[in-house]
Each structure stands twice: as C-alpha cells, then as structure tokens.
Image (spheres, rainbow, N blue to C red):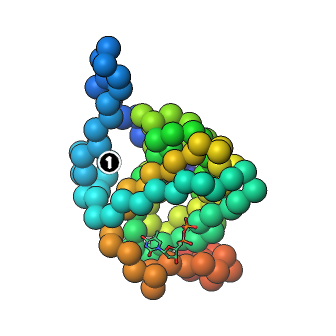
Amino acid sequence: MSLKEKCPILHFVDLGDERGKLVVIEGARAIPFEIKRVFYIYDSDSTVVRGQHANRESEFVLINVAGQSKVRISDGIEEVVVELNKPMMGVYIPKMIWKDMYDFSKDSVLLVLASTHYDPKEYIRDYEEYLSLVIN
Ligand code: TYD
C-alpha cells in the first residue's frame, strides 16, 4: 500500500448554509476511529517544526480549522507533504507513521483528533529507532 493510501486525505461534509459553515466529525464515522483525545496547536510560527515522532498505538486526524500548516509524513520508505488549509479537510495518520508539522501561518489552529489517551511511552522520538522498527 502506498503512503498516500495509508494516509488518505479526508473531505468532511460541509453542512453550512446562509448562516455560516458547519463541519461535523463523528468518531468511527467520518474518521476511521473512535475519538479519545482532542488537542490543538496554535501560536506556532513558520520557523517551528513540531511532531518529529511516530506513535506505536495512536491514530490521528489533523485538521487546520483556521490558517494553514504542512505535515510531512513518512513510513520510512516514502515521504509525502500534505498542506492543511481548509477546515473541511483533514489527513488520517495511522500508527507507526513519522510526522513533522511545520510552516504554520500566524493564524494556524491545528486540530488533532486521536484514538488514544496520552501515553508518552508509545511515542518514538528517535528517527533511527523508528527506521529500525519499520524496516524489521
Ligand atoms: P509534543 O508531543 O512535543 O507536541 P507536538 O507533537 O505537537 O510536537 O507535546 C508537548 C507537551 O505536551 C509535552 O510535554 C507532552 C504534552 N502533551 C500531553 O500532556 N498530552 C498530549 O496529548 C500531548 C499531545 C502532549
């Protein structure tokens, strides 16, 4: 499976009308997992690189609900850059994918939906360790 197939772009339904836009994301319906955790990243700027890790257990969906940012994802073989710049689109990131988030616009609010509660032990922050795990 290619990296783009493993990490599909998700297009959410826009339920907007003349009063404004509305996007609804229901766990295990609009995205492939039940949501256990939500966090958002803002006030990062274009010089910052965040992420720089892979997760043994967690799956994520990343959505820029305001502004824009980029996420570089890798499975140790391929690399893809996704530009997150619309509140009705997101990217699904399964387990064991390396990710870097960067190029945050000043108004960027990056919403992250996660399939797990936070556990620092499931993070792999060393790229060499990550590579040895995915290659074996
Ligand atoms: P970090 O993983 O470095 O953020 P990013 O992936 O955006 O680069 O997390 C920053 C700090 O926040 C770190 O001390 C761990 C803490 N944290 C939690 O306590 N719970 C969470 O769900 C997350 C994502 C981070």
Position above or below: 17 against 125: above
Residue behind label 1 places its C-beta within 8 angstroms of ligand 1: no
Query: Residue 68 location, x and y as percent?
Result: 59, 41
Query: What residue do we see at 50% from left, 78% from top?
Result: 123
Give the residue furthest to the bottom: 121
Query: Residue 42 location, x and y as percent?
Result: 55, 54
Query: Residue 55 location, x and y as percent?
Result: 48, 72
Query: Residue 131 location, x and y as percent?
Result: 63, 75
Lateral position of residue 23 relative to residue 100, left or right: left
Query: What residue do we see at 75% from left, 56% from top?
Result: 47
Name the residue nearer the viewer: 75 or 121: 121
Q: Quadrant of residue 33?
A: bottom left
Badge 1 amino acid: Ile
Query: What residue do we see at 25% from left, 51% from top?
Result: 27
Q: Quadrant of residue 83?
A: top right
Give the residue furthest to the right: 47
Name the residue nearer the viewer: 122 or 103: 103
For disc 1, the neighbor class at 10 Å (few under 14, some 14 to 19, many from 20) is: some
Position above or below: 20 against 66: above
Q: Is residue 16 visible?
A: yes
Query: What residue do we see at 41% from left, 60% from top?
Result: 39
Q: Is residue 80 visible?
A: no
Q: Which residue is mark 1?
A: 31
SS assignment at label 1: loop
Location of the C terminus (image quadrant) = bottom right
Lateral position of residue 98 relative to residue 95, left or right: right
Q: Quadrant of residue 21?
A: top left
Total numbered labels placed on residues in the image? 1
